[in-house]
Image (cartoon, rainbow, N blue to C red):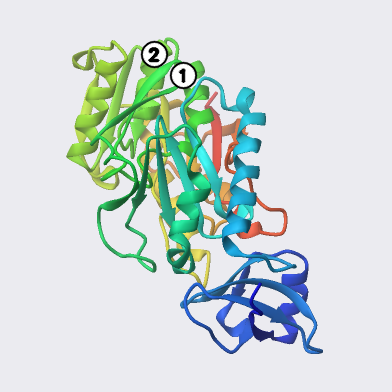
Amino acid sequence: MTPLKRLALTHDTVGTVARGHPWVYRDGVIGSAAVGEPVELLDGKGKRVAWGLFEPGPIAVRVLGRDPMPVDRLLEMRLSAAFSLRRQLAHDLGDTDAYRVCHGEGDRLPGLVVDRYGDTFVVRLYARAWERHLGAIVEALRGQGVTCIWRRFGVGKVDDREGGEVLLGPEPADGIVVREHGMKLLARVKVGQKTGLFLDQREHRLRVRGWASGRSVTNLFSYNGGFSVAAALGGATRVTTVDIAPAAVDDAKAIFRLNGIDPSHHRFEVADVFNWKGPAADLVVCDPPSLTHDKESDAPARKAYRDLHRQILPMVGGWLATSSCTARLPWDRWEEAVRDGLGHGGPGLPDARWSRLYTGSEPADHPIGLSHPEGRYLKFMLITRDSG
């Protein structure tokens, strides 16, 4: 293969890259290259440490390994390994045709995400470096039992626009009905959140279904009601679904109908959760969007989660299933913020003792590299209050 452009790593970056971290930050490399250009990364003695793809922005190189190879061959090899891993995980994934095919850094393709919804692959790029190699990505995804490959836009530092484009086959449907653990969900791959659904909460939706029997349930920040329909199918007496987006709430009602549930027996609210107050429910599900983008400190995130849990406390009649997708906060700091928020109920509310019953994180189709702690983002726990 053609010799790669050679860039020097700074002294304090060499060890991190050598241990397998998939990113080189801008101040960790000397020199530059074209966007998406393969580069060789050298230590102070001119010895190769790794290679990767160059890009603009705070992350300058997406590291792909130690020994260079043609990018198309690497994509074919690593995506093939990703497909094989998902086949091996079939038992863990359960009866579903919606799952993550490639989880970026966890599948050693940093910045590249591919999700499957039935017969459609949805590609999302979190690194501009991959745009140059889109053709090779499509070729590596070909022949995996799908009829459509759709690229979803919406990542500010990469494409910063709405919509998407067809990479292979016909344009996908506006809504794709998929199955998950015996229920039907509606994925809006063109306009919905992320690539259409929050696939990383699949196992937690199943947990909520098991916890809901005979309980009233309130689902806050519901998006299109995945937790809500899971609770209803699990035998909840009444489900309240709350989201700020009217289209998402409409889809939640449609998903209830897809599963043979009459939405009129339940409650749907278009409201900003931060300004909404509802009656106490036996089980409250709280899965907010990332509450901070501050990269300098975790203090704003801790305050945001503390304040949120302080606000929702009056609605929690017993059980609370709460979650965070904020990588900024590690588990212990997030749990501390939740505990602090729930420990201040305000006038007229008794002090409560809380017990943690269950914890969860990323599912098996969202692998996290052991050398990439920044990839650990999802936190989920069920806690219960004993006020006796």
From what the image shows, is residue 38 above or below residue 252? below
Classify mark 1: residues with Cα within 10 Å, few (<14), some (14-19) or many (20+).
Answer: many
Q: Is residue 321 visible?
A: no
Q: Quadrant of the C terminus?
A: top right
The residue at 63%/57% (across/down) is 74
Measured Cα–Cα span from mark 2 to mark 1: 7 Å
Residue 233 is labelled as 2
The total number of labels drawn is: 2
Q: Which residue type does callout 1 highlight?
A: Arg
Q: Quadrant of the N terminus?
A: bottom right
Q: Quadrant of residue 381?
A: top right
Q: Quadrant of residue 373?
A: bottom right
Asked whether 80 or 162 is in front, the reply is 80
From what the image shows, is residue 161 above or below residue 268? below
The residue at 48%/81% (across/down) is 34
Classify mark 2: residues with Cα within 10 Å, few (<14), some (14-19) or many (20+).
Answer: many
- Asked if labels 1 and 2 touch by Cβ distance under 8 angstroms, the answer is yes
The residue at 25%/35% (across/down) is 173
Apparent side of residue 23 relative to residue 283 in the rendered image (left or right): right
> Percent from the top left, x then y, of residue 325?
48, 49
> Percent from the top left, x then y, of residue 115?
46, 41
Q: Is residue 164 visible?
A: yes
| Disc 2 element | helix
| Disc 1 element | helix
> Percent from the top left, x then y, of residue 128?
44, 68
- Say which label, 2 or 1, has the lower sequence index: 1
Asked whether 311 or 87 is in front, the reply is 87
Q: Residue furthest front?
A: 1
Apparent side of residue 70 relative to residue 245 in the rendered image (left or right): right
Apparent side of residue 21 relative to residue 224 in the rendered image (left or right): right
Q: Which residue type does callout 2 highlight?
A: Leu
Residue 209 is labelled as 1
